[in-house]
Amino acid sequence: MFDGKLEVRKVSDHSLVMRGTEEERLLKLQGTSAHAQHFSYNSHHEEGTLPSSLLWHARFGHLNYDSICLLKKNVVAGLPTIPRKLKQCDACILGKHSKQSFHDSHSRAHRKLELIHSDLCGPMPIPSANGNKYIMTFIDDYTRICWVYLLKNKSDAFQTFKNFHKWIENDAQSHIGSIRTDNGKEYTSNEFENYLRQHGIKHKTTVPYNPQQNGVAERMNRTILNMVRSMLFFKNVKIMFWADVVLCVAYIKNRCPSNAIRNKTPYELWYGHVPSVKHLRIFGSTCYALIPKVHRNKLGARSRKCIFLGYSNTSKAYHLYDEVNKKFVVSRDVIFLESSKSDNVVERQLDRLDRFAKTKSFQEFDNQIPHLEGGIPILDQHVESSSEENSTPHETPTTNDSLSDVIDRIGRLNLDSVQTQSMEQPGPSEKGPPKWLTKTLESVHPDEVGKTGTINSNRQNGGDVDDSNSPVDMDASYVCELNLSIDFEPTSFKEATSHDEWKEAMQKEYDALIKNDTWKLDDRPFGTKPIGCKWVYKNKYKSDGSLEKHKARLVAKGFAQKEGVDYEETFSPTVKWDTIWILFALATQNSWKFHQMDVKTTFLNGDLKENVFMSQPEGFAVKGHEHKVCKLVKSLYGLKQAPRAWYEKLTENPLKLNFNHFDLDDATLFV
C-alpha cells in the first residue's frame, strides 16, 4: 500500500537518484536537475534490457534482431546478453520498407465477358508498315481468349474500346460486367469513365506503380512479345512487319492450351468446338499466290512470289506481302515453301531467270517469239524461232565490237530475214524499220554507207565482205537502224573531270544543292563516321533520240547507314493503278479537266528528322574547311529514308489546304 513516500534508484547499482513525497495529492520529487538529466541519458544508452537492444542494434548498422542473437553464440566476444526483442525502429522503417508479396488470385469469372483484362503496350521502337506504334489487348477472364488491336497513338485507346465493346457484345450475345486495367491516363480519362458508367461496366484499376495487380494482361503482353521476337528471328523477317506478327501471334495463342483453363484452348471455350490447325504455316515463309485470271495473260506468270504474314481476320484466306509490287495480298490459293532448303532452290531459280531476262534480241521479226513483260521462260530449255533450221540465230552486239563488225552482222541478219520472208510471202515487204530504232547507220557513220544508200562491200580497214552473206545492192530502207550512242558517260570522277561538259554538269548540280540548302558544314561529332557520296553521270535524250543534256547527280552512299542511328522509318506508299483508273473514269463521266505535274529533284525536297552526316562531295570541298562534314538538312538521293521524307513532305502541304487524306485505302490519294 502506498504510504506517500517514493524513491527512484538506478537499475545497475541501485544508487539513489530522487526521492518523492505526496503533498495534496501531488507527488513532489526532490533531487538536482543535472542528476536527473544524467539518469535520463543512461536510461536509454547504457546496458540494460530495451535500451541495450537498441544500442547494439544501432552499433551493428541496424542489424535485424535474429542476427544479433546469433552473434552471441561464440561468433563475437564482448556482446552482452540481449534479453528480449526490439520494438519497431523508425529508422529501419524509413530505410528498409519494401513491397509486400503478391498472392495468386483464386477468384475467376463464371461466364463470358464477366471480367475483361486490358492493357496498352508501347510505343514500339519503329512504326509498323501502316504507322502503328501501340498494342492494345483485351483478355476474357473466363475463356482466356485474347483480342489484339493496333493503335497509332495512345489517344486512340478510348475509340478502340468503344469499337471492341460494340463488336464483342454482339458476337457473344452478352454484356461486359467489369474491366480491369492499370491507372494509365488512356483508361482513367473522364470520357472513358463516363462511358463505363453509362453502360454499367465496373472499372477495376490497379494501385499506382503496381502492374502485378493486372497480371493477366501483363503476362499476355510478355508472351506475345516473346513469340514476336522468335518468329521475326526465325525467318529473318523485316522488323517493319512486327504488327503483322502480333496479329498472327494472337491468332495462334487462342488455339494453344492454357493451364488457367485446365489445358483447354481459349478458342474451344469461346466457340464451343475444337479448333482446326491444319491450315497453319510458318510465319515469314516464301509462298506463291495465284494471280486472278483477270490480271494475267495467257503467257504470263500464274502466281506471284510473296511473304506469308498471317491469317485474314475477315475471310478464310492468308495475309501476304508482295515485295516486288510493294503490296499486301489476301489470297486462299497459296503454295508455301516452308523449308529453308526449298527457299534456297527458288532463289537460285529466280536469279537464273533474272539473268535470262537480261539477254535481249538484236532485232525482232514477225516469225520470232515476242518478248512478253512478266512472262517467265521455261528453265533448261532453248527458245527457238519458228523459221527454217538454217536461219541465223540472234546475235547481241557488245560494246567491244567495232562498228564494221556490227555493220557486217546487220547485213547478214537483214538479208536472211528478207530471204525468209520472200519464201513465205512472195513479193516485196511493206514493213518499215522497227519503231524502237532511232538512228540510222548513215547518221552514225556516213562513211560506211554508199551514196545510193547501199552498204559498201569494202570496209575502210581493207577487209572483204562475204558476198554470200551480205547484200550487194540493198535499199537503205531495209537496213536495220540502231540506237548507237557515241555520247560518252563517265564511270568515275576522274573521267568526268577530263570533259568540260561533265564538269559543267557537276557544277550545276552542286549549285542547285547549295541553293536548296541541302546541307550545312559542321564539325564531325566525336564517335560519328560520316557516310560517303559519289557522282553519277547519265546522258538525257529527247523523244527523237537526240541528246538533250548531260546530267550529273550527287548520290549518298546509303548502304553505310545504320538503323536507329541515322535513319528510322523508310516505308513510303506508292500509287495504286486502280485509283488512277477510277479517277479517269470519273473525269470522263463528269467532263473534268486533268492536270499532270512533274516535280524535279523530288527527293531533295524532303526534310530530314535524323542527324545524318556526309563527307563533302569529291572535287567540291570548301577551301579552309576540308576537315568539316556536311550535316544533311534535306534528303538526298541514295538515303534510305529519302522516299519516306518526300512522302511526309507531300502529305503535309495538301493537308494544310484542307484536303482529305485517304490513308487507309490509298495513302497517295488526297481529295
Image (tube, grey):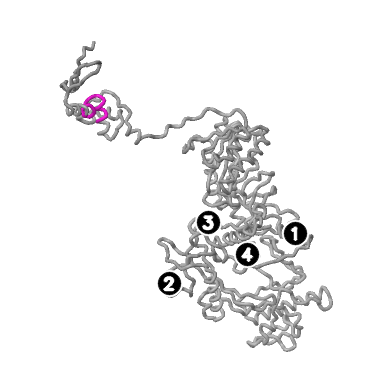
Position of residue 371 measured from the top left corner of the image (x, y, whole percent): 71, 66
Q: How crowded is mark 3: few (under 14 residues within 10 Å), some or many (20 or more)?
A: some
Query: Mark 2 highlights which residue?
Result: 626
Q: Mark 1 and mark 2 in contact (Cβ < 8 Å)?
A: no
State the residue in front, 160 or 302.
160
Q: Residues within 10 Å of mark 4 (few under 14, many from 20)?
A: few
Q: Which mark is residue 297?
A: 1
Nearer to us: label 3 or label 4: 3
- Residue 509 appears in view: yes
Task: Give the alpha-carbon distance from disc 4 to disc 2, as whole Å.
Answer: 43 Å
Query: Mark 3 highlights which residue?
Result: 568
Residue at 52% over, 38% down: 182
Total labels drawn = 4
Q: Quadrant of residue 291?
A: bottom right
Q: Mark 4 and mark 1 in contact (Cβ < 8 Å)?
A: no
Say which amino acid is labelled 1.
Answer: Asn
Q: Earlier in the sequence, mark 3 or mark 4?
A: 4
Q: What stretch is highlighted in magenta?
A: 41-55
State the residue in front, 534 or 471.
534
Task: Give the alpha-carbon distance from disc 1 to disc 3, as whole Å.
Answer: 40 Å
Q: Is residue 454 left or right of residue 286?
A: right
Residue 51 part of the magenta-drawn span: yes
Nearer to us: label 1 or label 3: 3
Task: Give the alpha-carbon distance from disc 3 to disc 4, as whole Å.
Answer: 33 Å
Could you say whether the residue bearing mark 2 is in a helix, strand or loop? loop
Say which amino acid is labelled 4.
Answer: Arg
Q: Residue 355 carries which label?
A: 4
Could you say whether the residue bearing mark 1 is in a helix, strand or loop? loop
